[in-house]
Image (spheres, coloured by chain):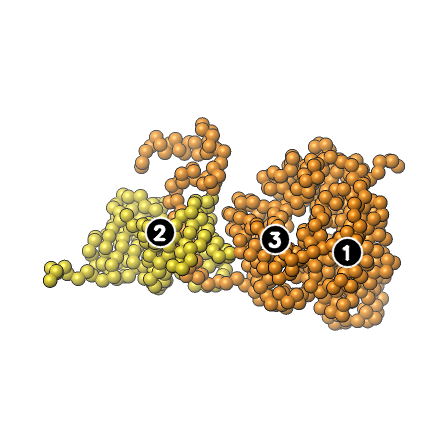
């Protein structure tokens, strides 16, 4: 099954700089998706797990190089080409957070936290519009309503009421437009 | 009264320091076939220096004032472990004559110059007077004991502006003020005196012409207890921030053989005049005119001593140990033949974009560079918690090669290979200094950073590839809350003892797992 991952990164607190929204999916070393809505791809394979993170091989098509990614709470540190980059995980949009326009380009909706899926309000094939409630996650006695990040048609639903879900886990995916009615091959 | 010579053979040495210098000294002691004893605060109990020694005494809690700086505990540690000598490193007790006297009174060999020499050279006015007697050039100034502002004002007119107000007992930039205009002098005198009184217990100040622009050039000297004195060439330490050195190198691009000869001779003359024993450093300011002026003497091993070791081939700690045992220097000035070029980078937990403010935090991952022309002196390791208790210096990255260009190229290669993840460091800033065309040209001065890199800041945009690598890395991490195959502990290639000893588990983990198994999937 294809794994999906959605994350927004910003610079550390007190540092000015743009937030970058990444969506990646893939079950081989080739991960594809989008970066701020633009199609993006990266080859990445695990060299080994290290404390706090991983050492990986990354390829951009021309070169294959080593990178190290470690995570400490909401900070992600990347060592790549002799430099350390410090990123901060920017919380995903939820119903009580107006969010940023760049998040709306995502083509799936992920759980904002680790908890239990309380209910799913949409079904495969259903057309949804931006802001429409999709599912509700309960954690620490709080309910989080996750809305549709954009207009689209539900392609898959990855869970049912009562399921345990991880933070960042993809629950609902979309296709950008309704599939054309099936026609017999001429 | 005692007939025991102050410098005599010993077998066990207490290293009264921490961090990279303690580890470096311990390595020197072990290489000499001697026993090394470390001291450590509770915060440093598993620091590299504590683990490298033959044994280590925990002497108190994290703050240095409650551990490394408690003289009776340090001396008790030496006594309890059967040490016959004590090496102070730099900082802490290294230039504390009273501590040296206590150590000697406790029957220890002090690996450093005699206490009275530390006293005399530690007083800037006394040192300046001694330098003058020894024929060493000194910057024009007023060294009178007068604290009468009127007298100092008249003296200042004679010296000319800009000038420096300095604390007689000062160091590290404290109690020092530069004065551009006559009308600012009175305020500067008062401020410097107050600061000096608070920091050093003496508010005595003196005046000195401000040499500007200037390069900081220092000469490494060495003396044995038999009157043999020589120098091991110069180090240039002009690249500084807040009066603290950042990058040091040897030889200096500004010193030719004739100047080296003159500066070396001056340094040796002052060392001889002070009846010095051991390793020391004579600091000078070098003006654009080519004239040099005595600044001060540091009566200890310097942070930057390895650049001298790399170009001369001598092990300064080995020389210190031999001199402290009373052995004569086994070589002469003519044997000292530096070759190649060495450069040292001080890698610190500090934020160059925010006034070099010290940073704290856990070192999440540390991989050190090696290979041709690289030496690393470090005092930290992966998982070490950097605290605000101590100096921000984490490690020293040294590079050497046949010429300056090669040394710089290797230093940059080493910086790019260094993986130091966790607290903010100055690694990228150091790379920016090395990459600067004025640095490459050797056009250095003590205002280099202010002149060229005062508004430096790291790149703040997150590159496409970096965002993608971060996400890919996170995707490849073990799922949150799910223990990894190695038990979620250390590096997967280095399981901890708890994970490899069957039947033994930290109590917290044991209960957690048992209940998880009993309860099954919930």
Residue B517: give x, y in percent of width and height: 35, 32
Residue B149 visible to the viewer: no
Q: Which residue is mark 3?
A: B373
Please, what secondary structure does the residue beneath circle 3 have?
Answer: loop
Q: CA distance from mark 2 to mark 3?
A: 37 Å
Q: Nearer the viewer, mark 2 or mark 1?
A: 2
Label 2 SS: loop
Residue visible at 76% across and 42% down in the picture? B322
Residue A42 visible in image: yes
Give residue B73's quadrant in the image.
Answer: top right
Left or right: B400, with B148 as reference point: left
Disc 1: which chain?
B
Q: Position of residue A69 (x, y in %)?
A: 45, 51
Q: Is residue A150 left or right of residue B72?
A: left
Chain appearing in orange on the rendered image: B
In-image side of B484 versus B391 (left or right): left
Please report contact status of discs 2 and 3: CB closer than 8 Å, yes or no. Answer: no
Q: Nearer the viewer, mark 2 or mark 3?
A: 3
Q: Which residue position holds label 1?
A: B282
Asked which quadrant contains residue B175, the reply is: bottom right
Q: Given the image, what chain letter belongs to the residue carrying mark 3?
A: B
> In this picture, is B165 found above or below B18?
below
Mark 3 / mark 1, whichever is N-terminal: 1
Please give the label number shown on residue A106: none
Q: Which hue is chain A drawn in? A: yellow
Q: Which mark is residue A29?
A: 2
Q: Is residue B456 above or below residue B505?
A: below
């Amino acid at each position: 099954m294809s794994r999906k991952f959605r994350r927004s990164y910003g610079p550390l607190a007190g540092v000015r700089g743009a937030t970058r929204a990444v969506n990646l999916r893939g079950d081989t070393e080739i991960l594809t998706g989008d970066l701020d809505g633009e199609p993006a791809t990266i080859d990445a394979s695990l060299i080994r797990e290290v404390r706090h993170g991983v050492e990986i091989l990354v390829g951009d098509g021309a070169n294959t190089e080593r990178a190290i990614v470690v995570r400490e709470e909401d900070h992600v540190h990347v060592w790549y080409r002799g430099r350390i980059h410090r990123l901060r995980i920017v919380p995903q949009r939820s119903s009580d957070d107006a969010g940023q326009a760049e998040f709306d380009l995502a083509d799936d909706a992920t759980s904002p936290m680790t908890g239990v899926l309380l209910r799913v309000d949409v079904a495969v094939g259903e057309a949804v519009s931006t802001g429409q409630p999709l599912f509700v996650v309960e954690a620490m006695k709080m309910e989080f309503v996750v809305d549709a990040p954009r207009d689209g048609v539900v392609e898959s639903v990855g869970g049912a009421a009562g399921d345990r879900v991880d933070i960042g886990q993809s629950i609902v995916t979309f296709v950008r437009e309704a599939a054309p009615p099936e026609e017999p091959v001429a | 009264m005692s007939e025991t010579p102050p410098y005599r053979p010993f077998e066990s040495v207490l290293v009264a320091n921490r961090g990279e210098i303690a580890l470096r000294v311990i390595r020197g002691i072990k290489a000499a076939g001697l026993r090394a004893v470390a001291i450590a605060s509770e915060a440093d109990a598993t620091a590299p220096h504590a683990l490298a020694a033959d044994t280590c005494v925990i002497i108190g809690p994290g703050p240095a004032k409650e551990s490394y700086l408690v003289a009776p505990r340090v001396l008790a540690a030496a006594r309890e472990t059967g040490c016959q000598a004590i090496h102070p490193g730099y900082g802490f007790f290294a230039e504390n004559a009273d501590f040296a006297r206590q150590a000697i009174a406790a029957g220890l060999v002090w690996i450093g110059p005699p206490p009275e020499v530390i006293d005399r050279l530690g007083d800037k006015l006394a040192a300046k007077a001694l330098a003058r007697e020894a024929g060493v050039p000194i910057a024009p100034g007023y060294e009178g004991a007068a604290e009468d502002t009127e007298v100092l004002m008249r003296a200042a007119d004679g010296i000319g502006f800009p000038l420096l107000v300095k604390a007689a007992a000062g160091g590290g930039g404290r109690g020092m003020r530069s004065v551009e205009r006559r009308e600012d002098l009175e305020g500067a005198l008062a401020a410097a005196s107050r600061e000096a009184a608070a920091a050093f217990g003496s508010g005595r100040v003196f005046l000195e012409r401000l040499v500007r622009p200037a390069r900081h050039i220092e000469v490494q000297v060495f003396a044995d207890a038999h009157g043999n004195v020589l120098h091991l060439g110069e180090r240039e330490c002009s690249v500084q921030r807040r009066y603290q050195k950042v990058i040091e190198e040897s030889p200096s691009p500004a010193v030719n053989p004739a100047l080296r000869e003159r500066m070396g001779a001056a340094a040796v003359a002052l060392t001889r005049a002070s009846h010095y024993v051991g390793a020391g450093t004579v600091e000078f300011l070098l003006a654009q005119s080519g004239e040099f002026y005595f600044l001060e003497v540091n009566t200890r091993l310097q942070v930057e001593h390895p650049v001298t070791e790399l170009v001369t081939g001598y092990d300064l700690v080995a020389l210190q140990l031999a001199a402290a045992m009373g052995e004569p220097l086994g070589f002469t000035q003519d044997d000292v033949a530096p070759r190649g070029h060495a450069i040292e980078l001080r890698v610190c937990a500090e934020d160059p974009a925010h006034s070099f403010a010290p940073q704290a935090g856990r070192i999440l991952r540390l991989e050190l560079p090696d290979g041709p022309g690289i030496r690393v002196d470090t005092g930290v390791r992966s998982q070490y918690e950097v605290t605000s208790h101590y100096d921000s210096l984490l490690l020293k990255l040294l590079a050497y090669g046949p010429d300056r260009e090669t040394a710089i190229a290797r230093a940059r290669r080493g910086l790019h290979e260094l993986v130091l993840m966790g607290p903010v460091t100055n690694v990228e800033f150091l790379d920016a200094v090395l990459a600067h065309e004025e640095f490459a040209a050797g056009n250095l001065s003590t205002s280099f950073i202010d002149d060229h890199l005062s508004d430096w800041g790291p790149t703040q945009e997150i590159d496409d590839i970096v965002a993608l690598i971060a996400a890919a890395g996170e995707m490849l991490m073990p799922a949150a809350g799910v223990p990894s195959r190695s038990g979620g502990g250390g590096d997967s290639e280095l399981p901890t003892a708890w994970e490899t000893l069957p039947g033994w588990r930290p109590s917290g983990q044991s209960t957690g797992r048992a209940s998880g198994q009993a309860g099954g999937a919930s």
